[in-house]
Image: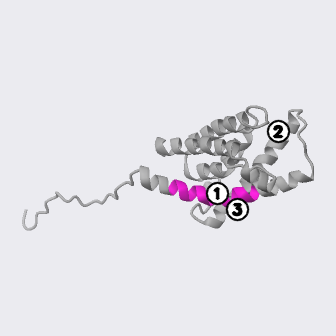
Amino acid sequence: MNWVNTFLILATAFLAVFWEAAFPGLSRVFGAQVDLLPPLMVYAALSTNLTTVCLLAFWGGLWFDSLSATPLGISILPLFGIGLAIHLCRDLVLRDRTFAQVVIGLGASAAAPLLTLLLLLTAGHTPIVGWGTIWQLIVMSASGALVTPLYFLLFDWLQRTFLHSPLPETSFRSDREIRRGRV
């Protein structure tokens, strides 16, 4: 992968975390925060290398935790676990199918808050868990499932715009002279 693609993914993660913190309108309407990092991790795990997945998990988790009430660094491990699991199985996934993107985005968006909650409980914190948690999990999972194909469309457009496509190579050279006849 190209470093430009990695930069675009990290810039999108920064903007997604900033958007979640700066514009809480959707969280007030639905009663739950929309998390945009797990769908981005799905795209990174299916389309880039492991280095980009690690960078997105580290920086995305730190940026998210710095603007939320969770302890700093607690979101890194769930994001990395999701990214690693998808990256290891990416040969089995039909990356270009919208249905596969939606299903994997749904699973990743459900797994991220559950793994974060598990880490919080393991670390001795007492998060508020109740019936509203189920509604928040449903909203986060559904929104992540809907956002995942949009990330694929966005990054396909960005790659067509900013990155050059490699030229197909043939075995025929246009400047080659073919001799015919007796040697």
Rendered position, 181 above or below 142: below
Neighbor class of circle 3 (other Cα within 10 Å; few <14, some 14-19, many 20+) is: some
Q: Amino acid at mark 1?
A: Thr
Report x, y in % for residue 147: 65, 57
Image-based side of 1 in relation to 37, left or right: left
Report the residue marked by disc 2.
119
* Mark whose residue sits in front, 2 or 1: 1
Residue position for label 1: 148
Q: At 74% from the left edge and 39% from the top edge, which residue is drawn? A: 75
Q: Residues within 10 Å of mark 1 (few under 14, many from 20)?
A: many
Q: Pick whichever, 101 or 15, lies toward us.
A: 15
Residue at left offset 74%, top offset 56%:
107
Of helix, strand and loop, which one carries label 2?
helix
Is residue 128 magenta-colored? no
Start-end of magenta stretch: 141-156
Q: Residues within 10 Å of mark 2 (few under 14, many from 20)?
A: some
Q: Which mark is residue 117?
A: none
Q: Which residue is situated farthest in the left direction here?
A: 182
Disc 1 + disc 3, Cβ < 8 Å:
no
Report if residue 129 is visible in the image.
yes
- Tell me whether the residue at label 2 lies in contact with that at label 1, contact meaning CB atoms closer than 8 angstroms: no
Q: Is residue 11 above or below residue 105?
A: above
Which amino acid type corresponds to the residue marked 2 in the rendered image? Leu
Say which label, 1 or 3, has the lower sequence index: 3
Name which residue type carries label 3: Val
Q: Which mark is residue 103?
A: 3
